[in-house]
Amino acid sequence: MKIELEYIEKLVKLVSENELSEITLEEGEKAISVRKDKIIMPAHVAAGSQPAALPVQATTSTKEEKSKKEVQAGERTNLTKITSPMVGTFYRASSPGSTPFTEVGKSVSAGQVVCIIEAMKMMNEIQAEVAGRVVEVCVQDGEPVEYGQVLMLVEQ
């Protein structure tokens, strides 16, 4: 599937104008997703730098790009995946040299910030959806991530 910028712009417009939260189109082994995400700003980002509208993220990937870690997580029923809600850069701490939000072996509570995804110069706090113990951080600090990519595994 050859994806043209005009086509992606039309999908973004479709999501925005129809109050959709997400749309995914698949053709063969390729897929494109457009998703509207809520941005949560960390305390260290200046107020007033938050956008007026919610951003819309578009990603493309092949269905076979699932990591081994995602497959392994599916095999263990007591593990919950914390996934990236957007395309961006993964950070374990609020700033370079700061203590990471969480570590392997540490307990997290539902709603606790576990990392930041930087997207379009905006810092987006990612929160744990469940309480439990972090058993694996699947992404390296500063590494680019895609929508739906597993960031951490939490054992309930």
Image: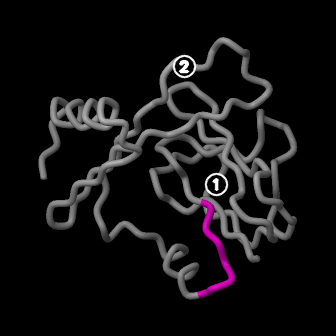
* Badge number at residue 153: none
Q: What amino acid type should be assigned to the residue bearing mark 2?
A: Pro
Q: Position of residue 123 (x, y in %)?
A: 64, 31
Callout 2: SS: loop
Residue sitting at x 83%, y 61%: 108
Mark nearer the viewer, 2 or 1: 2
Give the residue furthest to the top.
Answer: 48
Callout 1: SS: loop
Q: What amino acid type should be assigned to the residue bearing mark 1?
A: Gln
Task: Classify residue 115 as left or right of residue 21.
Answer: right
Give neighbour class at mark 1: few <14, some 14-19, many 20+ (Cα, 10 Å).
few
Q: Position of residue 109 (x, y in %)?
A: 83, 60
Magenta residues span 76-82
* Badge number at residue 140: 1
Where residue 110 sits, quadrant-wise, is: bottom right
* Badge number at residue 51: 2
Residue sitting at x 50%, y 59%: 149
Q: Position of residue 54 (x, y in %)?
A: 49, 29
Q: Is residue 62 magenta?
A: no
Disc 2 from disc 1: Cα separation: 28 Å
Q: Position of residue 62 (x, y in %)?
A: 28, 62
Q: Is residue 79 magenta?
A: yes
